[in-house]
Image (cartoon, grey):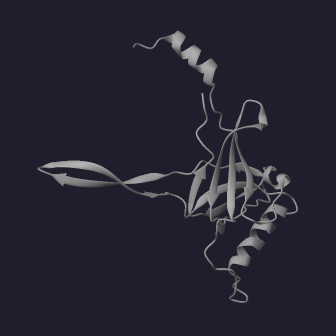
Amino acid sequence: MAQNIQDFFRVAQERGFARDFMLRVRSIGDYSFDEDDFVYITTKSLPDRTIINQATPFMGLAFNVPGTVTYPGSDSWTVQFRNDINGIVRNKLEAWQRGIFDDQTSVGDISVPGTDRVIQLDLIGDQGDDDVRNSYFLVGVYVKGLGTIAYDLTGDGKLTTFDALLSYHYWQSSGVPTG
């Protein structure tokens, strides 16, 4: 069946299009972040998931058989934050990271993060935050790294940002949207 411009308009009206601003972070780990803190998140991306291919040769042909799964980027998932003037969000991330390992005392919680440490990402629809279309849960999260904040005394007042590198084990979704 050939596709034409009417098919495009029909499907576009039925399904709509996802926009780059329609992903919300609802929770990060089991730490003390609240909805006000999430206003400062500027960029994030849905994580990747890949099935490892297992080539199985037989009589000169290579058959492709699905193997196990990997989560590329799960060791350093980047979220960018705006830096508030009091450093509230940064301080929370620093405290969380120091709780994992404190170089001053050489102690911390270096146990394997469990299923209680989850990042929830919501893909929202056209009606805003109350119109959640799908949720993603990154399981076993912890703060791996905090990026620098660049200040410039000759600058023009640009807002400062910093990256947080978060690690997790795997992710799940709440399901495939219908429609």
Quadrant where the image shows the C terminus = top right
Quarter of the figure with residue 178: top right
Q: Is residue 58 above or below residue 99?
A: above
Q: Nearer the viewer, residue 25 or 112?
A: 112
Is residue 166 shown left or right of residue 149? left
Quadrant where the image shows the N terminus = top left
Residue at the extreme right of the image, as rendered:
86
Q: Nearer the viewer, residue 19 or 50?
A: 50
Q: Identify the residue at image location x=79%, y=57%.
A: 83
Q: Nearer the viewer, residue 83 or 74?
A: 74
Is residue 40 shown left or right of residue 142? right
Residue 121: horizontal and vertical position, in percent?
68, 49
Residue 34: horizontal and vertical position, in percent?
83, 57
Q: Is residue 56 above or below residue 21?
A: below
Residue 165: horizontal and vertical position, in percent?
63, 63
Residue 127: horizontal and vertical position, in percent?
77, 31
Q: Identify the residue at image location x=85%, y=63%.
A: 88
What number of labels is visible?
0
Quarter of the figure with residue 27: bottom right
Q: Identify the residue at image location x=54%, y=16%.
A: 8
Residue at the extreme bottom of the image, as rendered:
105
Q: Is residue 126 above or below residue 100?
A: above
Q: Is residue 134 above or below residue 49?
A: above
